[in-house]
Amino acid sequence: MRSLKQLVHFGWVQTLSCLFPVVIFASLAITKILPLPYLSRYDWLLIICLLMQWWMVYSRLETLDELKVITVFHLIGLALEVFKTHMGSWSYPEEGYFKIFGVPLYSGFMYASVASYLCQAWRRMKVELVKWPSYYLVVPLAAAIYFNFFTHHYLIDMRWWLSGIVMIVFWKSWVTYEVNGTGYRMPLAFSFVLIGFFIWIAENIATFFGAWEYPNQNDAWSLVHLGKVSSWLLLVIVSFLIVATLKQVKGDYSTKMRMEENNNIPGGGKCL
């Protein structure tokens, strides 16, 4: 019974952490079944995403620091979308006022929702990293993975090499987390695979409701190729590395500030 309770509690925390993605999926479904008046579907989706983002910050479900991280992901995702649609990887066939180079602005929120989930789950489950590699390995690796999404159209696709490097770099890394006060741990590389697989499932749901279209879905919807899991796995890795690095930097900065404050307080210096 305890294991069942822990599983239910874990599912509830995950549901709360996925609030932003759930709203996006619900909006995709509703606007697909019930067209809204006055504006195009893509424009309504942007308005819904903006209102949801405002509400999450206003209700303190997200902090201002998390909003900054999410904004970074929105810009990174939008840049990737513009390039990929230009290369014909997928398309947004519907009309809309708020589009840039054929890409609706709401699409950036789909990437931002991944960051929102990571930030929410990180805080709610008290995630900590064990044996996290050096910044000098993590930052170049994240940059190489991201730029490979662009360069593989012109040069050799390095995704499998990069995946192998990820396994080597994070082989000894673990992630610890709490569920209802009980601590657990998981190999970090395995957590990447799990999140990437569930995002692939979410991608099938999104394309079913017309969030975007792959070339093989122009005439009728079909299951997204399983090979896309590797792409989402790498994207999740980039997302996780960015969030983790920012949290590490902020943690180091906060520790430094506390030490400086203690050194400036009478009687709060170093203990001998």
Image (cartoon, grey):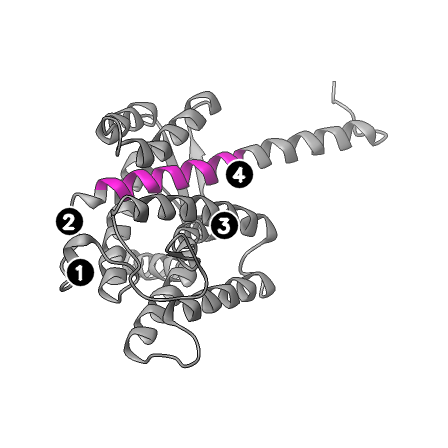
Image-based side of 223 in relation to 265, left or right: left
Badge 3 amino acid: Ile
Q: Earlier in the sequence, mark 2 or mark 3?
A: 3
Tell me, for residue 247, which label it has, or none.
4
Tag 1 residue: 218
Distance between the alpha carbons at the discs numbered 4 and 1: 41 Å
Q: What percent of the width, then of the height, locates residue 179?
A: 40, 52
Badge 1 amino acid: Asn
The quarter of the image holding the C terminus is top right
Q: Secondary structure at mark 2?
A: loop
Q: Is residue 86 above or below residue 58?
A: above
Tag 2 residue: 225
Q: What percent of the width, then of the height, locates residue 197?
A: 24, 48
Q: Nearer the viewer, mark 2 or mark 1?
A: 1
Looking at this view, is 36 or 267 the one in front?
36
Query: Which corner quadrant of the image does residue 183 belong to?
Result: top left
Tell me, for residue 70, which label it has, or none.
3
Looking at this view, is 187 or 236 the one in front?
236
Query: Which corner quadrant of the image does residue 46 belong to?
Result: bottom left
Distance between the alpha carbons at the discs numbered 2 and 3: 28 Å
Give, as a single range, the part of the protein colored magenta: 230-248
- Residue in the picture at 49% in, 50% down: 70
Distance between the alpha carbons at the discs numbered 4 and 2: 34 Å
Badge 4 amino acid: Lys
Residues at badges 2 and 1 in contact (C-beta under 8 Å)?
no
Q: Earlier in the sequence, mark 4 or mark 1?
A: 1
Q: Secondary structure at mark 1?
A: loop
Label 2 crowd bin: few (<14), some (14–19), many (20+), radius 10 Å:
few
